Amino acid sequence: MRRRDLIAGVGSLGILAGAVGVLWRGLPVRDEPPAADSSGDTDSDDSGGPIVLETIDATGSEEGTLEVPNDGVTVAMFFAPSCGNCQALMPNLREASDQLHEEYGDDVTVVSITSNRSEDELREWWDEHDGNWYLGHDPGRTLGVTYRVAGYPVIIVIDENGEKHWHKNGVLGARRIYYGAAPVLDEYQERTQAADGADDAEEEPSGTDSEVEESDGEESDSEDSEDETTDEVDESEDSLENEETDGVEGKETDD
């Protein structure tokens, strides 16, 4: 009996732990399982190069590819079309995206990423929920696995070096999304400005060409002046010699 009670107790603990996990992470989405377990979170991309996402031709997006990381800061939303919280997050992300682009321009890239569904279905879902930024398709969930994304929706912020600075789950307000990305963008702009300043300093020589030309011109003018002075002295001496010669010849004539 005691053994049965012990086994039953262990089983109850397992069910309780499972219930806590559901409450904590949320129910899994049927058509798109979580990309990876959230334990052991990573702060950077160790793959050795950017991950290339396929982008879909839709409102605010164009057919092609998008590299993450890229020459800027990336705000990436991971979603599943059948996820109700993902649908609720869309208008907030749109407001935050508009604010970020207004302030930081092309330094920020916003992309929503999913792994399943056809392009036509995704495009229809996108228009229904007023998406107007990059729509990425990642069938292998490469980006989600790299940054250990679990569940939906998830928003992460990645800098130009592939380092993850911000990672949040659930339905977030526009203001919270904005202030999650803005400090990363400020740091990025400071780094790029410092790098541009260092490049400009390296390009400037110790003496400019105009200064060298002015110096050469001054030396040339000085030499010309010396030559003119020498010529004037020579002419003066010749004049004196001529006057002395004329005086001597005059005396000889008088004599």
Image (cartoon, helix red, strand yellow):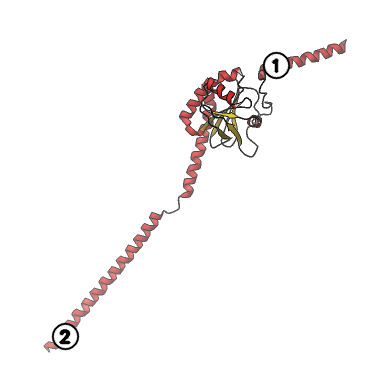
Q: Is residue 176 above or below residue 222?
A: above
Q: Residue 165 appears at what percent x and percent y?
A: 59, 30
Give the amino acid at mark 1: Val
Which marked residue is nearer to the observer: mark 2 or mark 1?
Answer: 1
Q: Residue furthest bottom?
A: 255
Kindly identify the residue that appears in the image at 17 percent across and 82 percent down: 246
Q: Residue 234 appears at what percent x and percent y?
A: 26, 74
Quadrant of the drawing holding the C terminus:
bottom left
Name the residue carrying label 2: 249
Between residue 122 and residue 95, name the one nearer to us.
Answer: 122
Q: How crowded is mark 2: few (under 14 residues within 10 Å), some or many (20 or more)?
A: few
* Lower position in the chain sequence, tag 2 or tag 1: 1
Tell me if 229 is positioned left or right of 65 in this view. left
Q: Residues within 10 Å of mark 1 (few under 14, many from 20)?
A: few
Q: In which quarter of the image is residue 63?
A: top right
- Using the numbered discs, state the Cα–Cα distance from disc 2 to disc 1 in whole angstroms: 133 Å
Q: Residue 87 appears at what percent x and percent y?
A: 57, 19
Tell me if 233 is positioned left or right of 84 in this view. left
Q: In which quarter of the image is residue 110?
A: top right
Kindly identify the residue that appears in the image at 69 percent across and 17 percent down: 22
Q: Residue 125 appears at what percent x and percent y?
A: 56, 21
Give the amino acid at mark 2: Glu
Name the residue carrying label 1: 20
Q: What element carries label 1?
A: helix
